[in-house]
Image (tube, rainbow, N blue to C red):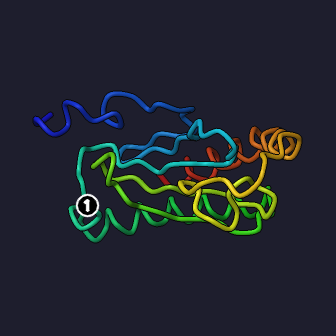
Amino acid sequence: MGATAQACPLCDADAAALIWRGDKLRVIRADEAGFPAFYRVVWNAHVAEFSDLSALERAHCMDVVVQVEQALRQHLQPTKINLAALGNMVAHLHWHVIARFDWDSHFPAPVWAAAVRERALEKEDAVRALLPVLEAQLRKSLGLRS
């Protein structure tokens, strides 16, 4: 690893629950308070920008992002899915795939904004209870395409 990657938290560890790992990328569930269905699609090699990937790699990456989004929509029926690839704090290519609900503490603002209401802990727990089935189906579908 180069000097940039030495201090990279996404190179050092997943910092979350590993859902699936392929040769090129992995899917993790982030531990973000208030957002039980917050996933990251992380490119395994340390690259900073989407354009660092070949056309085939970009297509593979976006295919996995779409599969995560579809699983969230199918199992959770969220109000909206948020996709983001900012990388300002961690310059390692990763996509955020976040199920958002009109009752969540920040909706309709971004998850990184200030809360607009109290957390709905019972509703968060209900979403969390659905994740094992969602993640099992996601592992199966991703395993078929890796």
Q: Nearer the viewer, residue 37 or 138?
A: 37
Residue at the disc numbered 1? 49
Q: Is residue 23 left or right of residue 63?
A: left
**Residue at 33% over, 47% down:** 89
Determine the image quadrant of residue 104: bottom right
- What type is the residue that disc 1 sits on? Glu
Viewed as shown, does residue 52 lie left or right of 110? left
Please give the name of the residue rendered at 33% of the width and 43% of the height, measured from the top-left corner.
44
Instruction: Give above or below for 73 relative to 44.
Output: below
Q: Left or right: where does residue 4 sit relative to residue 83?
A: left
Give the quadrant of the N terminus. top left
**SS at circle 1:** loop
The residue nearer to you, when weighing 143 against 1, is: 1
Q: Is residue 18 above or below residue 52?
A: above
Instruction: Locate residue 52, reporting x and y percent.
Output: 21, 62
Spot occupied by residue 118 in the image (x, y as percentages of width and height): 78, 48
Q: Quadrant of residue 5?
A: top left
Q: Position of residue 96 (x, y in %)?
A: 50, 55
